[in-house]
Amino acid sequence: MTQIVSVWVRDPRIRKNDFWHAYMDYEICLHTDSVCFTKKISSVRRRYSEFVWLRQKLQENSLLMVQLPQLPPKNPFFSLNNAQQITERMKGLQMFLERILQSPLWLSDSLLHLFLQSQLSMSKMQACAAGRTHYSVAQAIQQCGLRRFHSEEDLQKDLSMSCDSDSDSSECRDPEPRIKDLALNKAASTALLGLMGTSTEDHLISSSDSA
């Protein structure tokens, strides 16, 4: 029987490191019946630089036997107020994950599972995968919260609802909390709805991507 692994990259949100610096992260939703995964439904948030890190580590762990799929290229002119650039990047990140999840070689890598189903930082993911933490890979994954969904249609409905909500109660928490800027988050979501045909008069706040 064919096992299903469905992944979506969605819900871009702008985060503020400090007064001058901001970056964008994305929700990764996973829905599967594969025995390879500890959790069958999960939701975490990752930024572009973490995808770059994951690809590098997976390539190292595969001993260069297989060439990994490419990520969308880093754009020095990427702007957090450019909805088209954000959408193109999300599509590229989702395509990257879809191709990764088709390979039994990469499905056996603990770093991939921690990336997809925990909100550990890059250094803590690496330490956990190497057995240098007081918690196991499975424990790190089990501690991460869920956002329940059943289909891509449900995700689209959820996207429409979440654009008007400032609540992050369903997302996983990093041990090192990040500061949020709710106004910027809502502006980014509004821009994405505009691409989907929803009219809006909101304008995004200009900022540069530090990812």
Image (cartoon, rainbow, N blue to C red):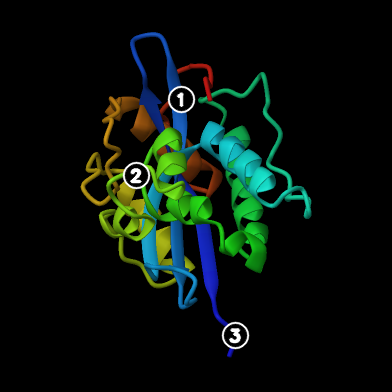
Q: What residue type is labelled 2?
A: Cys
Q: Residue at x 57, y 28 (%)?
A: 82
Asked which quadrant contains residue 55, the reply is: top right
Which numbered circle lies on residue 23?
A: 1
From the image, tell me which residue sits under label 3. Answer: 2
| Image spot of residue 36 (x, y percent) | 49, 71
- Direction from residue 152 to residue 124 in the image, left or right: left
CA distance separating discs 3 and 2 = 35 Å
Cβ–Cβ below 8 Å for labels 3 and 2?
no
Q: Considering only order in the chain, which callout, 1 or 3, is on the residue closer to the N terminus?
A: 3
Residue placed at 57% from the left, 36% from the top? 53
Which one is closest to the eye, mark 3 or mark 1? 3
Vertical side of 82 occupied by 172: above or below = below
Would you call the spot at circle 2 few (<14 residues within 10 Å), some (14-19), or many (20 or more)?
some
The residue under the point 58% across, 44% down is 90
The residue wearing badge 2 is 163
